[in-house]
Image: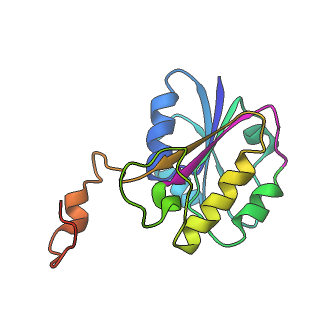
Amino acid sequence: MRISIIGLGWFGSVLADTLSSQHEVSGTTRSPEKSARKNLNVSIETLDTTTTPSKDLLNADAVVLNIPPFTHQLEWFKSWSWNMNTHLIFISSTSVYGEMTGTLDESTIPHPATENARILLEEENWVKTFPNSTIIRFGGLIGKDRHPGKHLSGKKNLTQGN
């Protein structure tokens, strides 16, 4: 299977490394310097907001769209030469639920409270127009070099400490 990962950041690099043992994986970074630092067994293209991915990347069996939100991002995505037969996997965030608490699932109606969350929700709605799409809403990602204790260390007067 050919898989493209648009955004080889923290999550995208781990995903590429994991998938590359069994699949043909390609991906993007924002600069050639970042490409050189990635020690991945994947082909890497440079992609920034002034360029678009190659047709080869967009013609993969699956494309993982894994870029943090920014203003006018959806227009940029729409300008790409998408293959509508590709399975589009969009990495979103639980931030689309805003300040809601309790048990939330895909049937919960989102209420984004930040601009980035509003952008993600708008992009999710666009992704749903693809015949074969999956939306994954991440929240609280942790990993080998990403432990929540590091982000809280030394902070005082934290609310909801549990």
Q: Residue at x 37, y 59 (%)?
A: 101
Q: Is residue 47 visible?
A: no
On screen, residue 107 above or below 78: above
| Residue 43 falls inside the magenta stretch | no
Q: Quadrant of the N terminus?
A: top right
Residue at x 55%, y 64% (from the top left corner): 111
Is residue 25 in view from this perspective? yes
Report which quarter residue 52 is drawn in: bottom right
Of 15 and 51, nearer the camera is 15
Residue 115 at x, y percent in the picture: 58, 73
Q: From the top left corner, tell me how far across and down residue 60 is, in percent.
A: 72, 32
* Quadrant of the snapshot with the C terminus: bottom left
Report the label total: 0
The one of 128 and 148 positioned closer to us in this rendering = 128
Q: Residue at x 19, y 60 (%)?
A: 149
* Quadrant of the rendered image containing residue 51: bottom right
The picture places residue 112, in percent across and down from the top left corner, at 54, 66
Q: Residue furthest bottom?
A: 157
**Drawn side of residue 76 relative to residue 12, left or right:** right
Question: Which residue is located at x 82 percent, y 37 percent?
Answer: 84
- What is the x, y in percent for residue 12? 51, 45
Instruction: State whether residue 42 is above or below residue 70.
Output: above
Between 7 and 64, the residue placed more toward the observer is: 64
User: Which contiguous range is marked in magenta?
Assistant: 81-93
Quarter of image, res 71 = bottom right
In magenta stretch: residue 90:
yes
The image's colour scheme reads rainbow
